[in-house]
Amino acid sequence: MDRIYHSDSLYSAVTNAAARLGFLDEWLEATVRAERPAVRFSSCFPFQASILFIVPPRSVWPPAASSKVRWKGARFVPVTTVAELMRSRTISEENWTVDPESECLINMGTGGPFRVAVRSSAAVDRLGESVAPHSTACIEFAPNAGLWAMVEFADEAARGEWRARVEGALRLLVDSGFGGERSRGWGRAEVAFADDALPIPAAEGEGEVAWWMLSLFHPGDADSIDWQRGNYSLTTRGGRVENSGEAKQSTRMIAEGSVLVAASEPRGSAPNVAPENSEHPVYRAGFALALPIPWQGPGARDRGSV
């Protein structure tokens, strides 16, 4: 059971909503067929009350080994904690623990934002003679918890053209449901929008800049990544086509939390992963939504206080 709703899945869901709302061709022209996509999505990360969790940059996480907290067991860390790490501040061992269910770093004495559960059901034929029991894993959220994501527009013109449409697509999706088992009412939610920026200090000064990935990333021809440096991990994405159920071609992608060293901001690409003999292309969005951070790794130039 994956604990992240990945950016390529979010793009696919919005694309399906765009088709239902009547602007699919315009959406594809502005994103996967454009030299620079007008809209990019991060992956969806957990939140609980006012705490936003995120996959931390691999260049600063985990901290030094501790006898009290197994830092590397935390897949998600509060955004405010990442901001402290970016300022080269230490984390108190006394205040934190890792929730094994959600893999979130949480305050001592509190619970995590979700847990993984298994629900059973049975399909019965119309005559009542055949019963097919099956079980499905799912995520169950705690009260006042859910998922959050970032949406980035290429410029103000793109924001003016696409913000209302993207919000409309997301409202349709939360009413109809994300993910599997939608016919059973799974994946339905409420949605809220905000213009708040993440409280992460931007890279500044004369030091080298790296790019912290908040989305899955598939490099494009124009991306100049220094693959001999950075701190990144790979994941393989598969899946099936929405209507036919045929398997998409698998793709290796850079995972969230990776830190890349590049001459300029990575853009990414959207390869066609349609099954063989498909009547139309099927795109997997690998656009980079990344934040610039100071590069803190082997080969980094001296940045004074870092």
Image: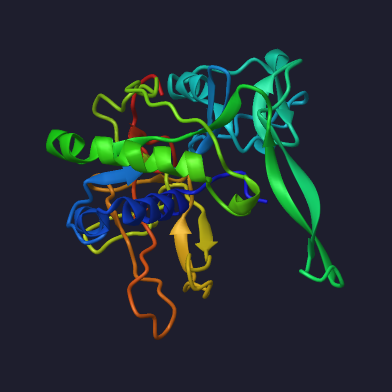
Quarter that holds the C terminus: top left
| In-image side of 55 versus 112 (left or right) | left
Classify residue 294 as left or right of residue 231: left
Q: Is residue 175 above or below residue 254?
A: above
State the image coordinates of residue 94 (x, y, percent, origin top left): 72, 13
- Front in this rendered view, residue 49 or 262: 49
| Count of labels in the image | 0
- Quadrant housing residue 157: top left
Residue at the farthest right position: 129
Q: Residue furthest front?
A: 127
Instruction: Give the quadrant of residue 268.
Output: bottom left
| Percent x, y of residue 40 | 31, 45
Which one is in front, 156 or 20?
Answer: 20
Judged left or right of residue 179, residue 287 is left
What residue lies at 39% left-to-right and 24% top-to-bottom?
Answer: 198
Determine the image quadrant of residue 28: bottom left
Query: Which residue corresponds to the image point at 47% horizontal and 47% vertical from the top-left?
Result: 231
Q: List x then y, in percent, for residue 225.
A: 31, 54
In the orientation shown, which residue stands out farthest toward the bottom? 277
Colour setting? rainbow
For image coordinates 66% across by 28% down, the residue present is 113
Image: 87 above or below 70: above
Q: Is residue 214 visible?
A: no
Q: Is residue 29 above or below residue 145?
A: below
Estimate the x, y position of residue 57 in percent, counting from the top left.
Answer: 48, 37
Q: Is residue 2 visible?
A: yes
Q: Residue at x 73, y 51 (%)?
A: 137
